[in-house]
């Protein structure tokens, strides 16, 4: 069955003392309907690199082998390798991190290392900025000297201010031309803002790394449109990764309708005009799954898996996994392997469910291993390596 096909409603499951087999069958049926299957064998091992992290959100690698980890509460941590080769979490967090609004889904989000870090020392952070009643998604650029951030400067601040602490987005990526893209959620207040050009809510954004607006952005010069907007119609974006010239992003639907998209300049991705999900109340958000002028997702996940981070794998340790997107999932407590061929998503594997943990981020390391962040008050950095 095609992943993009509408999934029929599953029967209600009553939790009786003898219902475990039935629940397992429904879970398996859900996987099959979503075009995925659990991994048949475990040809990998899971190593704990570091623990004791407070809801870690993002992981990035420095050229010298150190790793940077953000904690949602507003701390930036360093993982470094000692003389014995073991990786350890530095006790003190990095100084100079800007004040972060931490409440609900708000907090410190992504960390991105500049490709020329060895010379420039530049890193980028995204976070919730402001107050509960008037907040924004902000990106800053700073110089990291190994212990502290210096010359912290705003690159982008979403407009207008919104209230509450939901649907921020915040993942970042650099395009092939060196411009910086991020995605801003719809705020979960007025979902139709995702279709309006006077607000950054529900959009992907493209700027130069110093904050200037590229002259070839699709809405530059249009009356009433914010010039930073790159694409429209997004609900709650959670990840971005560039593969060659293609920018992939995923986002949360409501109850179902999570999406994997290929982002292009000026495209409209539909929210809330089109969606494969329904509202949390059970009501229809929209009667339409497609609409003229709307760019359809490459695949969707219904029921929802709650996608979070995403990575492209082309490493040497797992040859069978090369050419795949890896999508971490919060609700499904898994990582989806999505093989990509000619821009199309193939049959998916469901990995690492034995951990039983919400997975916030997945990254492909320079050593060819996969790295995962678990989303909890005692979160961990995990390394996935071949079993042998």
Image (cartoon, rainbow, N blue to C red):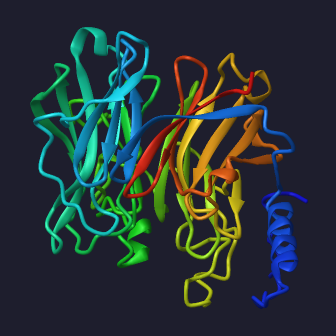
The reply, left or right, for residue 27 in relation to residue 67 is right
Q: Residue at x 27, y 56 (%)?
A: 107
The reply, left or right, for residue 157 in relation to residue 184 is left
Q: Quadrant of the C terminus?
A: top right
Q: Position of residue 42 (x, y in %)?
A: 79, 38
Residue 261 in the image: above or below residue 7: above
Q: Answer with the quarter of the image where residue 199 lies.
A: bottom left
Residue 227 in the image: above or below residue 343: below
Q: Position of residue 41 (x, y in %)?
A: 84, 40
Q: Residue at x 72, y 28 (%)?
A: 323
Of residue 27 and residue 116, the one placed in the foreground of this image is: 27
The reply, left or right, for residue 83 in relation to residue 315 is left
Residue 161 in the image: above or below residue 225: below
Q: Residue at x 26, y 28 (%)?
A: 123
Of residue 74 and residue 168, the one placed in the foreground of this image is: 74
Q: Position of residue 260 (x, y in %)?
A: 63, 52
The reply, left or right, for residue 148 in relation to residue 361 is left
Q: Quadrant of the N terminus?
A: bottom right
Q: Position of residue 14 (x, y in %)?
A: 77, 91
């Amino acid at each position: 069955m095609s992943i993009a096909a509408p999934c029929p409603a599953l029967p209600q499951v009553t939790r009786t003392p003898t219902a475990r087999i039935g629940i397992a069958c429904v879970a398996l049926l859900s996987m099959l309907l979503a075009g995925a299957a659990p991994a048949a064998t475990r040809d990998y091992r899971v190593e704990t690199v570091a623990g004791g992290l407070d809801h870690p959100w993002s992981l990035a690698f420095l050229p010298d082998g150190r790793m940077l980890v953000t904690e949602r509460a507003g701390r930036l941590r360093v993982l470094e390798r000692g003389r014995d080769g073991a990786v350890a979490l530095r006790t003190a967090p990095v100084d100079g991190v800007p004040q972060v609004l931490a409440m609900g889904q708000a907090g410190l989000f992504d960390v991105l290392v500049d490709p020329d870090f060895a010379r420039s020392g530049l890193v980028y952070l995204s976070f919730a900025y402001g107050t509960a009643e008037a907040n924004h998604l902000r990106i800053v650029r700073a110089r990291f000297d190994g212990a502290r951030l210096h010359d912290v400067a705003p690159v982008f601040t979403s407009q207008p201010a919104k209230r509450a602490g939901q649907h921020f987005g915040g993942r970042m990526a650099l395009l092939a031309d060196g411009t910086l893209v991020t995605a801003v959620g719809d705020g979960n207040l007025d979902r139709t803002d995702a279709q309006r050009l006077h607000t950054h809510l529900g959009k992907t954004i493209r700027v130069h790394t110093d904050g200037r607006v590229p002259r070839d952005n699709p809405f530059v010069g249009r009356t009433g449109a914010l010039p930073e907007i790159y694409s429209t119609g997004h609900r709650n974006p959670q990840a971005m990764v560039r593969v060659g010239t293609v920018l992939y992003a995923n986002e949360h639907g409501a109850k179902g309708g999570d999406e994997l998209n290929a982002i292009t300049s000026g495209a409209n991705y539909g929210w809330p005009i089109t969606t494969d999900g329904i509202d949390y109340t059970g009501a229809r958000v929209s009667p339409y799954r497609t609409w003229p002028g709307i760019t359809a997702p490459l695949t969707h996940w219904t029921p929802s898996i709650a996608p979070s981070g995403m990575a492209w794998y082309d490493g040497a340790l797992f040859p069978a996994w090369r050419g795949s997107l890896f999508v971490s999932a919060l609700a499904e407590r898994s990582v989806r392997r999505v093989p990509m061929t000619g821009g199309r998503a193939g049959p998916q594997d469901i990995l690492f469910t034995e951990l039983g943990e919400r997975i916030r981020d997945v990254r492909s390391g320079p050593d060819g291993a996969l790295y995962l962040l678990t989303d909890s008050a005692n979160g961990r950095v995990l390394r996935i390596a071949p079993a042998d």
